[in-house]
Amino acid sequence: MLDQTKKTAVLYRMVMDHHLCPYGLKSKWLLERQGYVVEDHHLTTREETDAFKQQHDVKTTPQAFIGGERIGGYDSLRARFTDYDPNSNKKTYTPVLMIFAVSALLALAVMWFFRGTAVSVRTIELFAAFAMTMLALQKLKDVESFSTMFLNYDLLAQRKVGYGYVYPFAEAAAGILMIAGGAAALIGSPIALFIGTIGAISVYKAVYIDKRELKCACVGGDSNVPLGFVSLTENLVMMAMGIWMPLKALVL
């Protein structure tokens, strides 16, 4: 029996032998996090699910009810309890910042393991190289989508469309070669310098001269990362690495 002193919600979700609806499970979890006692109804067959949808004139499950009012599915619950807007196309730097954060932690961990000290010049080099490699991986998930978004602002890609297809592989190669260090880094450095220079000029022109509001393809073609200062910084770091690595090897 439900505790009448607590907030209650009614949830209908698919729980079948060979299918457990993930959104139903997340809806239950979210309601419980908001302090609701959930009256959890399992729809155990396709026929039962179809009958429920017909009865309530809905197209999907799960469906949550609070105080007799139908709220909807997981997205509707998120919109009710958080600042989530399912129709929003809000731009965010979060994907890039998370990659930078993980890259920094990886660099610190590697240096601590191999040299017993976390902070050194090599830590900074590894951070930049890890970040390049992880950003390239995001692009390689869907090169076609990346190359399309890339064409919106990259000056070389607009002249040579094929460059947009090559770029993710070049960025990955440069990052991996710089992680390897030594002679390998000397091979990766001119690649990083080239793509970083073209990228920096392209971003600067699009954002600061043409004043265009575009999405950055830095984490792939399906992102909502705005093209701006962070994108420019990413390319400047590649340029700096492309100059620093051979300078360190040949002069210092």
Image: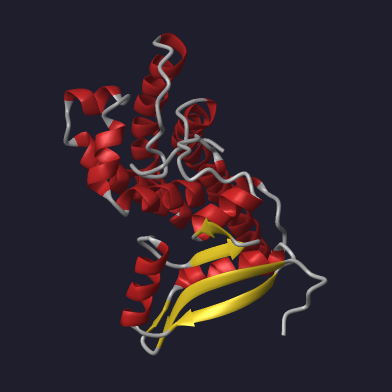
Closest to the observer, 221 or 86:
86
Q: Residue furthest bottom?
A: 17
Q: Is residue 39 left or right of residue 234?
A: right
- Quarter of the image for residue 188 reads top left
Q: Residue 181 at x, y = what percent? A: 46, 53
Q: Is residue 199 left or right of residue 120?
A: left
Q: What residue sits 72% from the left and 85% below the top?
A: 1
Q: Residue furthest right?
A: 5
Q: What residue sits 42% from the left and 64% below the top?
A: 56
Q: Residue 219 at x, y = what percent? A: 42, 44
Q: Is residue 65 left or right of residue 158?
A: right
Q: Residue 19 at x, y = what percent? A: 38, 81
Closest to the observer, 228 or 250:
228
Up-down relation of residue 98 to residue 57 (above or below): above
Up-down relation of residue 164 to residue 78 (above or below): above
Q: Residue 13 at x, y = what percent? A: 48, 74
Examine the rendering and report whether any part of residue 183 can be seen: no
- Quarter of the image for residue 227 reads top left
Quadrant (top left/top right/bottom left/bottom right) for the C terminus:
top right
